[in-house]
Image (spheres, rainbow, N blue to C red):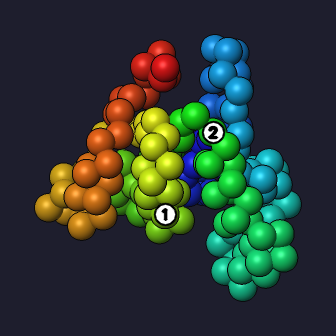
Amino acid sequence: MICGSMTFAKEMLKTKEILEEMGHSIKIPTDALEIANGNHNHDDLEADYNHCVENDIMRTHFKFIEESDAVLILNHNKNNISGYIGTASLMEVGLAHHFHKKLFLLQELPHHSEHRWVHEVRIMRPVILNGDFSKIE
């Protein structure tokens, strides 16, 4: 399962393609294609709220995580934070950890003194890929 900020929807599609070429079976958020194609504006919080509730997005993605062997968080730079992980992705990381899933981060995290959430993510001991998908086993 690929997770991350939906700002990275296009990158999710590209990463899915790369990993499938490597022989992995990949799930992505159900609305990633719609967002990547500009058919849903996830930054319009009111519309996004309605979309997520009507489509039970969170429960669906949590189920994908439960069914997966591993979770890859695309933690690109966002909001002037290198290795950004947003609130929804933080929940997904926690759920993956709870279900004993392999946990991968695309990039290194910022130092935990910069953002409290980094401390919690590091406790879960993810594998940092530093952009190298061949480290995914």
- Residue drawn 49% across and 40% down? 101
Q: In the rendered image, which residue does mark 2 sit on?
A: 68
When the figure is inspected, residue 136 is found, relative to residue 58, above or below; the finding is: above
The residue depicted at 67 percent of the width and 66 percent of the height is 58
Could you tell me if residue 92 is visible in this image? yes
Q: Nearer the viewer, residue 92 or 35?
A: 92
Say which residue appears at 23% left-offset and 58% top-offset. Answer: 119
Question: What's the CA distance linking mark 2 and mark 1?
Answer: 16 Å
Q: Is residue 84 left or right of residue 21?
A: left
**Where residue 128 is drawn, which disc sits there?**
none
Crowdedness near tag 2: few (<14), some (14–19) or many (≥20) residues, C-alpha within 10 Å:
some
Quarter holding the N terminus? top right
Which residue lies most toward the bottom here?
46
Q: Residue at x 28, y 59 (%)?
A: 120
Q: Position of residue 135 (x, y in %)?
A: 43, 19
Q: Position of residue 70 (x, y in %)?
A: 54, 36
Residue 76 visible in image: no
In the rendered image of this protein, does residue 40 appear above or below residue 132? below
The quarter holding residue 5 reads bottom right
Crowd tier of the residue under label 1, counting other residues whose Cα lies within 10 Å: few below 14, some 14–19, many 20 or above: some
Which percent across, then down, holds residue 37? 81, 51
Q: Check disc 1 and report the residue beneath it.
A: 91
Q: At label 1, which amino acid type do we have?
A: Met
Element at badge 1? helix
**Left or right: 12 in relation to 77:** right
Q: Nearer the viewer, residue 103 or 77?
A: 103
76 is higher (above) or lower (below) than 6: above
Residue 7: name its quadrant.
bottom right
Q: Residue type at mark 2: give it.
A: Ser
